Amino acid sequence: MTSICHITTAHTRYDVRIFHKECKSLTKVFEQVNLIVADGLGDEIKDGINIYDIGKPKGRTDRFLKMPGKALTKALEIKSNIYHLHDSELLRIALKLKKRGYKVIYDSHEDLPRQIISKPYIPKILRSPLAAIVEKYENRIAKRLNGIVTATPFIRDRFIKLNKNCTDINNFPLLSEIIGDNSIAAKENKICYIGGITQIRGLTEVIESLELTDTRLDLAGDMTNDYKTKLESLDGWKNVNYLGFIDRKQSQNIKNSSIAGIVTFLPEPNHINAQPNKIFEYMASGLPVIGSNFPLWKIIIEDNYCGLCVDPTKPQEISNAINYLAENPNEAKIMGENGKRLVKEKYNWEIEEKKLIEFYKALKTTNQK
């Protein structure tokens, strides 16, 4: 019997990429799939996946210092054949597992060194030196592992130079998520943003753009109290319907009634070559996308005529795009239909699932230690 174990100390147990996509897909071909999490909600069996909880960390420092050790202890109790690590702090236990004869995969969700350069809680003077140290450490461990999975082709191209057994498994929508109502009659004069709300994701500029349009914004997701206070002070906030954290059903209802989805991340190093889930989730729901004018995003959005790209630092450009889609509903509908078709044909999890399973099957049969 082949036993698989995914480990995360940073993500929730029902994380879409880890639980709903990767783990569920692997239950189709492997006898036992386990998931170690750190959320304090206890052990359970869900959808055929054995979930083991090692307790919730008290904070970021506790997560980095203590959780990897606890995860290692639980992993050695479970004795799976293959361990799949989802967080950078877990690299500290990767070689310990490998030395015991287990096969180990590292799943790089983000371009970590570039992400560090944009971390607001790290003093600016320390970001670049820290990013260089982290990249050197991450590279040293990654090249000794049995395989690397990355969330984008850009991150894959970095790691494949270190480890030839590397593949990109893109976090595209499930085909079951293609359920949006794209009829013009169902739309209200509003756009939507659903996800984490932070300064570097360009929400300040989006709110400022609302001063230049009559279109409203449904804003859903978590944000700090300080940032919420800052946004509320802007004149454009009067056109915002802030919903806080919402579930997947509420999210779909919002998308069904919106004329567009917006994702105008600022040009930070970790954003320029990223592929945010939101782009493809909006497309799956038949929404035209208003995105940042990064070269990769323009290929996905504008070259496929799925939406409009703008300079995310310029509220005027953002408002121009909003107004164009509000004033041209037939064009918006065509863009939305193009996006939905592309998700059906290309940007969907079912294609990525096949890549993941083949990667695992090849790893299972290799004699590499």
Image: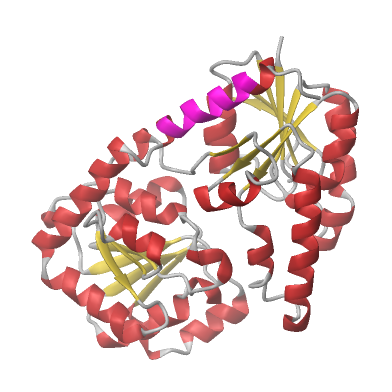
Residue closest to the eye, 211 or 32:
32
Q: Is residue 319 above or below residue 194?
A: below
Image quadrant for the C terminus?
top right
* Total numbered labels placed on residues in the image: 0
Residue 201, above or below 92: below
Q: Nearer the viewer, residue 311 or 277?
A: 311
Q: Position of residue 172 (x, y in %)?
A: 43, 43
Rendered view: 308 above or below 96: below
The quarter holding residue 41 reads top right
Outermost top residue: 1
Q: Is residue 55 magenta?
A: no
Between 139 and 304, which is closer to the camera in this rendering?
139
- Quick check: 244 left or right of 294? right
Instruction: Residue 331: name its quadrant.
Output: bottom left
**Which residue: 73% across, 31% down?**
146
Q: Position of residue 312 (x, y in %)?
A: 40, 77
Q: Dividing the picture into quarters, in which one does residue 279 lie?
A: bottom left
Image-based side of 99 in relation to 265, left or right = right
Q: Is residue 361 magenta?
A: yes
Quarter that holds the N terminus = top right
| Rendered residue at 33%/63% (across/down) | 298
Residue 21: x and y, percent?
A: 52, 34
Q: What range of the chain is rendered magenta?
A: 351-362
One can see residue 99 in this view: yes
Q: Residue furthest front?
A: 161
What residue is rendered at 72% in x and 82% in y?
A: 124
Please name the predominant secondary structure of the magenta segment in the image.
helix
One can see residue 40 in this view:
no
Q: Residue 232: x and y, percent?
A: 47, 84
Residue at the spot x=59%, y=30% of the render? 23
Is residue 48 left or right of 102 when viewed as pictured? left
